[in-house]
Image (cartoon, rainbow, N blue to C red):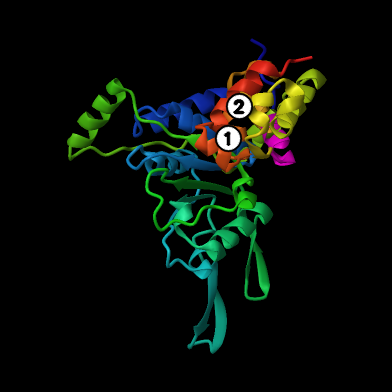
């Protein structure tokens, strides 16, 4: 294996391994989810996590924030949540006889938007501005958010009553949508034993700093990707829009909208991050295929006919990866 480009801190790959080890002191399993969270953090992409309750989504994110020495805030999205509860508001200071700003929980490095689809459109819109612009407007003043800034949103795929489905424009701004699955038997046995011990305390040590994260971003930026693979990414993206042109006529009738140009950017960045985490300074086709499902699954919009016929976006992505050649 070719090592990543050397920089001021050539031990970054070793530190990343330590991050996995430290988080593993508290969180059993869920290596896949942790890998995707780090890809999002190292490439500046927000992550949407979907999974049933109790799969350690919140625990993983809060533990990761401690290991990375980042400011973490969790916001429980509820139907009565207001935009000011998220971004902050102006309050009147009687002692000073003037209004002052009270910043909300969005002013953090890692923001967990728990059950993001339980809040109405105004709150989701406020979150959207912060995600896209990396800034927040309170009153007449705009405040930049502290970097790195990452939104990790969760939604429960089971209980849909009383929820507000995220608009396509907002979903598209998440770099990846990651499906979090149940643990393996051995992992769940370990979780049960740990948590049954009422004196258990999960202590972790900080491994990376903000400066390290930006240093890692610079090294990922130097990972090489060939023009052939860049064109392969474009072909994958276009196959979601015009399946019939890629010998995927069976899916043409089911596609309402293919993926947006953000998918191309996300695939490019995520593939470079996968190569970097694998301690390579070049991208392989397998790196693109590894992240294709998470990058594309929430961006392909299928119609009601697809739902009636039991066609899933996962089926279409798998077919695209089989059919689209690397030329």
At 63% from the left and 45% from the top, the residue drawn is 172
Is there a contact, CB below 8 Å, between mark 2 and mark 1?
Answer: yes
Q: Which mark is residue 297?
A: 1
**Circle 2 SS class:** helix
Question: Magenta stretch mostly in which secondary structure?
Answer: helix
At 53% from the left and 67% from the top, the residue drawn is 83
**Circle 1 SS class:** loop
> Which of 57/263 is in front?
263
Quadrant for residue 139, please give it. bottom right
The answer, for residue 280, to whether it is visible in the render is no
Quarter of the picture containing the N terminus is: top right
Q: CA distance from mark 2 to mark 1?
A: 7 Å
Q: Which residue is mark 2?
A: 317
> Which of 42/265 is in front?
265
Q: Which mark is residue 159?
A: none
The image position of residue 284, as x and y in percent, is 68, 16
State yes or no: residue 212 in magenta.
no
Q: Which residues are magenta?
A: 259-268
The answer, for residue 104, to whether it is visible in the render is yes
Q: Relative to residue 126, is residue 36 depicted above or below?
A: above
Quarter of the picture containing the C terminus is: top right
């Amino acid at each position: 294996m070719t090592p990543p480009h050397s920089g001021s801190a050539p031990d970054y790959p070793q530190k990343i391994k330590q991050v996995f080890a430290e988080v593993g002191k508290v969180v059993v399993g869920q290596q896949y989810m942790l890998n995707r969270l780090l890809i999002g953090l190292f490439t500046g992409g927000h992550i949407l996590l979907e999974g049933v309750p109790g799969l350690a989504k919140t625990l993983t994110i809060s533990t990761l924030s401690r290991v990375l020495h980042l400011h973490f805030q969790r916001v429980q999205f509820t139907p009565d949540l207001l935009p000011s509860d998220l971004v902050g508001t102006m309050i009147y200071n009687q002692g000073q006889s003037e209004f002052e700003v009270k910043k909300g929980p969005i002013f953090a490095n890692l923001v967990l938007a728990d059950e993001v689809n339980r809040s109405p459109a105004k709150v989701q819109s406020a979150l959207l501005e912060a995600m896209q612009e990396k800034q927040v407007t309170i009153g007449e003043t705009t405040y930049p958010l502290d970097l790195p800034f990452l939104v990790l949103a969760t939604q429960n795929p089971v209980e849909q009553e009383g929820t507000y489905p995220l608009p396509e424009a907002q979903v598209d701004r998440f770099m990846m949508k990651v499906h979090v699955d149940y643990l393996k038997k051995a992992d769940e046995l370990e979780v049960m034993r740990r948590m049954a011990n009422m004196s258990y305390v999960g202590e972790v040590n900080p491994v990376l700093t903000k400066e390290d994260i930006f240093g890692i971003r610079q090294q990922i930026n130097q990972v090489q990707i060939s023009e052939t693979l860049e064109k392969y990414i474009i072909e994958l993206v276009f196959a979601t829009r015009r399946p019939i042109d890629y010998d995927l006529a069976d899916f043409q009738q089911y596609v309402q909208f293919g993926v947006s140009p953000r998918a191309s950017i996300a695939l490019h960045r995520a593939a470079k991050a996968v190569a970097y985490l694998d301690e390579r300074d070049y991208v392989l086709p397998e790196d693109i295929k590894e992240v294709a499902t998470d990058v594309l699954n929430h961006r392909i919009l299928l119609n009601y006919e697809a739902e009636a016929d039991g066609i899933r976006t996962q089926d279409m992505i798998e077919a695209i990866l089989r059919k689209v050649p690397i030329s």
